[in-house]
Amino acid sequence: MQMNKSETQSFELNLNVKSAVPIFEQIKNAIKTAIFLKKLNEGHQLPSIRDLALKHKINPMTALKAYSLLEIEGFLYSRRGSGFFVHVDREKVKKEKQGVFEKEVKEFIEKINDLGYSVSDLKNELEKRLKGK
Amino acid sequence: MIRIKNLNYWFGSKRVFENFSLEIRENEAVLITGSNGAGKTTLLRLMAGVFFPDSGTIEYGQALGKNPKAGIGFISDQISLYQSMSLQEAIDFHCQVHHIKEFDAAMLAEAKLDRRKKIKDLSVGQKLIFHLSLVLSARPRLLLLDEVLHAIDPYLREICIRYVLELLTLGRTTLVMINLNYYDIEYIPQRVIILRNNAIALDQPMDSLKDKVKKIVSKVEIPGLPTFHERQFTDCFEYFVYPFEKSIVKNIDCEVFDLNLNDIVTAFIGGEYA
């Protein structure tokens, strides 16, 4: 197992104050996204609860909640006294990425529907692009 | 941590609280807000044991033991420090009284406070920082913060917030804060209470607050919404709604907007003035 304690690259946390998505969810999503994008890899140590809380001015209990839930979901593991580390379960990542993909597509379709286009318009557009390639 | 039951409190001939009840759990971080005169500061002082209820009870949790006041840290705009003492003298005195073995000087160092200075020679902001450093060093189990942070510059304010969070990291402190500015404390409270006319108008977990309070904008009037504030413009109606459910706007031609804490509190207070 690869251990990258000194690695500085971490995850981007752009919290949205207006979002109805709770802060612990926003933190979870940011970490998952970083795992999907391979910005966080197996064994990568996450910022400590204290650092995350102080840096983003969030309640440390909220940070702990996010990490703990990700641990239960199998995206992180913890070591007593040394913090939380990334665990990449390929199957799980693949499955969740598929879920994100489907959700993005669904939202995209809703957007083009609002503009007055249908899924078959989208299909035609995609086929045009595929032929062009 | 605190259980307030059927509290009645008069300020002279004015009744401030009437049969007021509120429970705050251990290790919770609670934000209390509302308009000027809504009773926020009075409530905090009652919790701190500075004011006493005329009737009703305030009970403290087991974490505070037999002498609750010893475990309460209270930061208000009325700081009682010995003005003629130097900071070092005040620190020594404070540590002796509260049995603190080692005073954590990091906060004072960050704020560049010279410990040889006399307290009376400090600025308002420096006094607050100093007071907070004393209070935090005792690691209170219950920390009560009145809105005092507005009086200091953003850099010192950031230091204060960071050290409060540092205390919360230990997981042994219940926090009750009163705020009128939210831009930098939005992610700290787990629960938001809005007082209106000395009663609780809203009490929501932070995680669901932004789900439950929404702004609805429509070109035509929509009657029957659970509105707490509304505004009419030449081209549209704005409704601030609580509690919001998706079903209430089903089949209605309108747009639903998310709000931040500042929008929510402002609208609540606006409803009071309307």
Image (cartoon, rainbow, N blue to C red):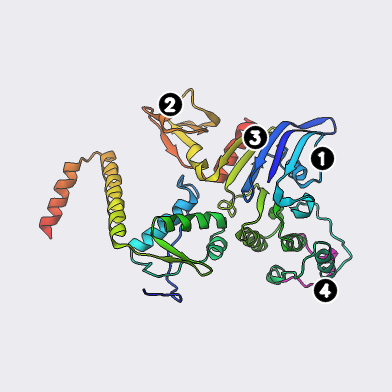
Dot in front, 3 or 4: 3
- Number of the front mark, 3 or 1: 1
Is the C-beta separation of discs 3 and 4 under 8 Å?
Answer: no
Query: In front here: B165 or B16?
Result: B165
Q: Residue furthest bottom?
A: A6
Q: Indicate the amino acid at tag 3.
A: Ile
Q: Which residue is mark 1?
A: B52
Q: Which mark is residue B116?
A: 4
Q: Which residues are magenta?
A: B112-125
Task: Using the image, determine if residue B86 lies above or below residue B70.
Answer: below
* Sequence-earlier tag: 4 or 2: 4
Task: Identify the residue position indicated by label 2 in the image.
Answer: B220
CA gap, disc 4 to disc 2?
Answer: 66 Å
Along the line of sight, the residue nearer the viewer: B192 or B66: B66
- Say if mark 4 contacts mark 2, CB within 8 Å: no
Percent position of residue B274, x then y: 62, 30
